């Protein structure tokens, strides 16, 4: 795991280029504290930088890696798995390597296969490869977007600046740090449009895509190509008869292989452990592969309604894991830890779960570990979220009698009542753009439509006028490839659209890479292995959600390592207790409000109306309805973090 940053220009680089690249790398040093490297060719307009976190080839894996013939230069953030097999094959064919790292296989595969090399790359990665012979820069991002990669192109089209994090781009002197008004509205409502950052002109390279950048007559020629997608079969192509056990065994086999590959490292590898079946089965299967106690890290909250530590402890004891429990209270989740998390995430968040994950990764580093396997992605592959379950009941069970569907729906609403206002809307919402795209409005976006209704009236008059014709819900729908939804089952549609929006923009950001790498700690989400994903999309919807049981096929695949209470447990969203749940949290969030939502700060940012924000805060303090408070808590976090972003990056 590392950080990458740099720029590519259609013109020779100025004398300040080395200092500019150094400034970029300083901003992401937390991603790679072990070494810094660069490659500059001023005449060709090339500047590639790298900060290294040593995981494989601790002594010899420094980057950039220059091919033995000097033809290509590589900088990579991430890990390639199964790299030893590729190294052996390439060497048998006459290739040779300068390092023992996993990263270098990208050069060998590129020389052998050209741009088709992406299909052989297995892992989580974002990298740049400069081909000197073609005078071309290639940027590649992994299939689900586990590793971040952002770009900015100058108004004259002559320079591209890139970085693992936006802050590395903002360190370039040609880039102005400015919050984008449209993005700000998305940030307030929670759901960003695919590819959107909080900052004007800065975009993320889409997951499963590569970008080619070439110089043409004083400008850059930029093209983007999709090399992979989360592709569900059309319903007409699914077999009408299937063998449930065959699907169970295939999922088990691919999951075990994904975990075993992610245990490969020259440093110890631990596990994150919550009370859900995802992380618990990771721990169980990793324990079997290691044949020794696995280090496990668990978050415990000071609110029994949100605390999963007791179930995680039962799992740890059953696997004889070496478990560390991180106990978090109000003073941990707010204050400087909250502010620090915003700086690392570079986007707003609706819940302090990201702060908790930041603190957990800090504990991992302090305990001597640099790498953990995590459970992100299981809900995306096997339909674990309550919103996906609701869509299955509403749109995917046409063969079931209405009373059966109503019974399922009532059970879902009862067990997830704690999260209404955040991850489930209490009333059905509809939007024409989504109805046209999907045939229905996915349940996952509906609570954020409710939040938008609260957020939009808070905008400053000038911003509101500028965005008077802008529909963020339609914008999100417009960035999704509708061809991937045609002929698919409603559950497939819900999973695909969620993964394109919430997985990359939220779960893998402030719930994943950004808060892990804040403390130089590499997370490896085994479920987001593309071979496992290929097995998951082939699983019939009726085996992903069977009756009222979500992730059925996964439960059966890992049944042997789960305690019975966990095997039978319904999905419980992993969230930190919201601020309104006790006085200590109310007091701590009040301190943040005083610092970042006061009249002067809101006025200076110019996004929201100070008077309307003050009125919202008064309504929030007077509210006593649990569902309304959950929704207002989410908006309060978005307001705070948006204004913290402004203070950190625009007006420091």
Image (tube, rainbow, N blue to C red):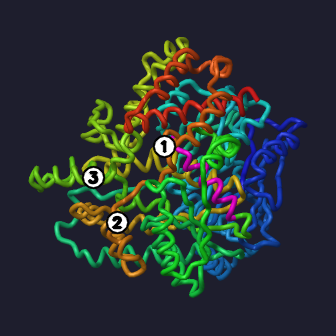
Could you tell me which secondary element the residue under label 3 belongs to?
helix
Q: What is the crowding at mark 3: few (fewer than 14 residues within 10 Å), some, or many (at least 20)?
A: some
Image-quadrant location for residue 372 = bottom right
**Pointer 3: what residue?**
412
Q: Residue at x 42, y 64 (%)?
A: 533
Q: Residue at x 78, y 55 (%)?
A: 51
Left or right: where 333 falls relative to 63: left
> Closer to the N terminus: mark 1 or mark 3?
3
- x, y (%) of residue 53? 75, 62
Q: Residue furthest bottom?
A: 291
Q: Nearer the viewer, mark 1 or mark 3?
A: 1
Predominant SS along the magenta part? helix
> Closer to the N terminus: mark 2 or mark 1?
2
Q: CA distance from mark 1 to mark 3?
A: 23 Å
Q: Residue at x 41, y 36 (%)?
A: 448
Q: CA distance from mark 2 to mark 1?
A: 24 Å
> Closer to the N terminus: mark 2 or mark 3?
3
Image-quadrant location for residue 512 = bottom right
- x, y (%) of residue 650? 71, 28
Q: What is the crowding at mark 1: few (fewer than 14 residues within 10 Å), some, or many (at least 20)?
A: few
Q: Which residues are magenta?
A: 350-364
**Pointer 1: what residue?**
581
Q: Is residue 187 above or below residue 80?
A: above
Q: Is residue 417 above or below residue 183?
A: below
């Amino acid at each position: 795991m590392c950080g990458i940053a740099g720029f590519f220009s259609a013109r020779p680089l100025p004398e300040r280029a080395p200092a500019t690249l150094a400034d970029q790398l300083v901003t992401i040093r937390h991603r790679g504290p072990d070494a810094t490297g660069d490659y500059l060719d001023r005449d060709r307009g090339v500047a590639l930088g790298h900060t290294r976190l040593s995981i494989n080839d601790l002594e010899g894996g420094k980057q950039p890696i220059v091919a033995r013939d000097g033809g290509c230069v590589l900088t990579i953030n991430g890990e390639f798995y199964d790299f030893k097999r590729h190294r052996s094959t390439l060497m048998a064919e006459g290739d040779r390597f300068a390092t023992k790292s996993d990263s270098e296989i990208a050069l060998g595969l590129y020389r052998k296969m050209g741009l088709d090399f992406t299909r052989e790359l297995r892992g989580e990665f974002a990298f740049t490869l400069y081909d000197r012979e073609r005078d071309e820069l290639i940027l590649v991002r992994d299939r689900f977007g586990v590793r971040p990669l952002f770009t900015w192109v100058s108004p004259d089209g002559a320079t591209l600046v890139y970085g693992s994090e936006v802050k590395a781009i903002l360190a370039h002197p040609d880039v102005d740090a400015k919050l984008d008004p449209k993005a700000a509205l998305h940030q307030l409502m929670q759901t960003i449009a695919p590819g959107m950052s909080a900052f004007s002109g800065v975009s993320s390279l889409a997951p499963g895509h590569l970008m080619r950048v070439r110089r043409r007559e004083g400008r850059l020629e930029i093209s983007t190509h999709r090399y992979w997608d989360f592709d569900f079969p059309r319903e007409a192509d699914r077999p009408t008869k299937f063998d449930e056990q065959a699907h169970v065994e295939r999922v088990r086999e691919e999951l075990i292989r994904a975990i075993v590959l992610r245990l490969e490292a020259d440093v110890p590898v631990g596990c994150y452990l919550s009370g859900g079946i995802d992380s618990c089965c990771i721990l169980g299967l990793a324990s079997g592969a290691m044949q020794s106690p696995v280090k496990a890290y668990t978050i415990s909250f000071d609110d029994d309604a949100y605390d999963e530590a007791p179930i995680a402890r039962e799992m740890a004891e059953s696997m004889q894991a070496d478990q560390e429990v991180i106990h978090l209270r109000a003073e941990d989740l707010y204050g400087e830890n909250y502010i620090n998390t915003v700086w690392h995430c570079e986007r707003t968040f609706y819940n302090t779960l990201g702060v908790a994950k930041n603190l957990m990764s800090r504990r991992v580093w302090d305990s001597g570990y640099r790498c953990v396997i995590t459970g992100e992605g299981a809900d995306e592959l096997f339909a674990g979220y309550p919103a996906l379950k609701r869509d299955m009941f509403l749109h995917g069970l046409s063969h079931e009698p209405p009373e059966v569907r109503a019974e399922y729906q009532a059970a879902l609403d009862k067990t997830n009542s704690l999260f209404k206002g955040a991850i489930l809307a209490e009333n059905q919402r509809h939007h024409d753009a989504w109805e046209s795209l999907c045939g229905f409005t996915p349940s996952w976006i509906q609570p954020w439509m409710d939040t938008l209704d609260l957020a939009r009236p808070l905008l400053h008059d000038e911003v509101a006028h500028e965005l008077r014709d802008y529909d963020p819900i339609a914008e999100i729908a417009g960035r999704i490839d509708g061809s991937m939804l045609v002929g698919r089952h409603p559950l497939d549609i819900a999973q695909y659209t969620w993964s394109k929006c919430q997985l990359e923009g939220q779960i893998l950001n402030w719930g994943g890479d950004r808060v892990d790498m804040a403390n130089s700690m590499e997370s490896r989400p085994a479920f987001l292995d593309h071979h496992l994903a290929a097995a998951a999309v082939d699983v019939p919807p009726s085996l992903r959600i069977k009756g009222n049981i979500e992730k059925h096929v996964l439960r059966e695949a890992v049944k042997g390592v789960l305690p019975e209470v966990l095997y039978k447990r319904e999905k419980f969203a992993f969230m930190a207790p919201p601020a309104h749940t006790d006085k200590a949290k109310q007091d701590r969030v009040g301190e943040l409000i005083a610092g970042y939502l006061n009249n002067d700060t809101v006025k200076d940012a110019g996004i929201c109306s100070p008077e309307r924000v003050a009125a919202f805060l008064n309504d929030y303090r007077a509210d006593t309805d649990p569902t309304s408070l959950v929704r207002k808590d989410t908006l309060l976090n978005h307001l705070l973090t948006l204004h913290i972003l402004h203070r950190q990056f625009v007006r420091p």
